[in-house]
Image (cartoon, helix red, strand yellow):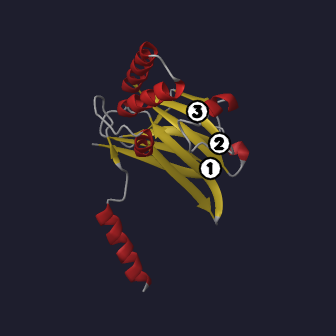
Amino acid sequence: MIRCMLALGLALCATAGCGPVKVPLGANQTLSDDYEKVLKAFTRHEETYEHFESRVFVDATYFAPAFALAYAQQRQERLGLMPNEAKVERERLVQRANGEARFFLSVVTNDFFWNDLDRKNGTLKARLIVNGEAVAATSVKRLTDDEVSDLVPFFPYISMMGRAYWAVFPKPEGKAVQLRISGSPAIIDLKWSGR
């Protein structure tokens, strides 16, 4: 019976297309006008457990150029930016997205001291996996509580029980992006596939 259920589950997974949702990772690709749908497409969530005990929960949004456009539009609407302000903001965000791999991260850990992605010798490290090689972040910035509060309308998955970060890496080549958050408590891999 268990084998039949497992086989059925695998068959459903294969036909339903389980795995990373393919998103437009390049520039000049149009998306839905619905920010929540775009945010969901560019956000990954993973969590780890050990012996039924939670270890690390991560939500990460990849700022590909296509997402940067949607985010700029949402900022214009929510902040009431004037057209000239919105244009400057949009150009700045897209230019940055074209030149680097930027991620917004919300991280919750079982032990508060593990949540230290921004420290040089922290418990957890953020790395981009490119062609099987780990690439270190060029910067990881932990956000203040005030900064986090300002971002909650744009990233509603933020948990006030954790910390939020901006992680920046050199721009990878190719149609797939893999972000790894790892350390002694857990290894979490978040993947984005391009179309």
What number of labels is visible?
3
Mark 1 in CB contact with mark 2 (< 8 angstroms):
yes
In the image, residue 38 lies at what x, y percent? 40, 41
Q: CA distance from mark 1 to mark 3?
A: 29 Å
Q: Residues within 10 Å of mark 2 (few under 14, many from 20)?
A: some
Question: Which mark, residue 151?
Answer: 3
What residue appears at the point 43 percent right and 23 percent down from the top-left corner? 93
Q: Is residue 193 placed above or below 166 in the rendered structure? A: below
The answer to which of marks 1 and 3 sits earlier in the sequence is 3
Residue placed most toward the observer, 79 or 3: 79
Question: Which mark, residue 184?
Answer: 1
Q: CA distance from mark 2 to mark 3?
A: 25 Å
Q: CA distance from mark 1 to mark 2?
A: 7 Å
> According to the image, label 2 marks what residue?
123
SS type, badge 3 = helix
Residue type (three-letter) at the residue carrying disc 2: Thr
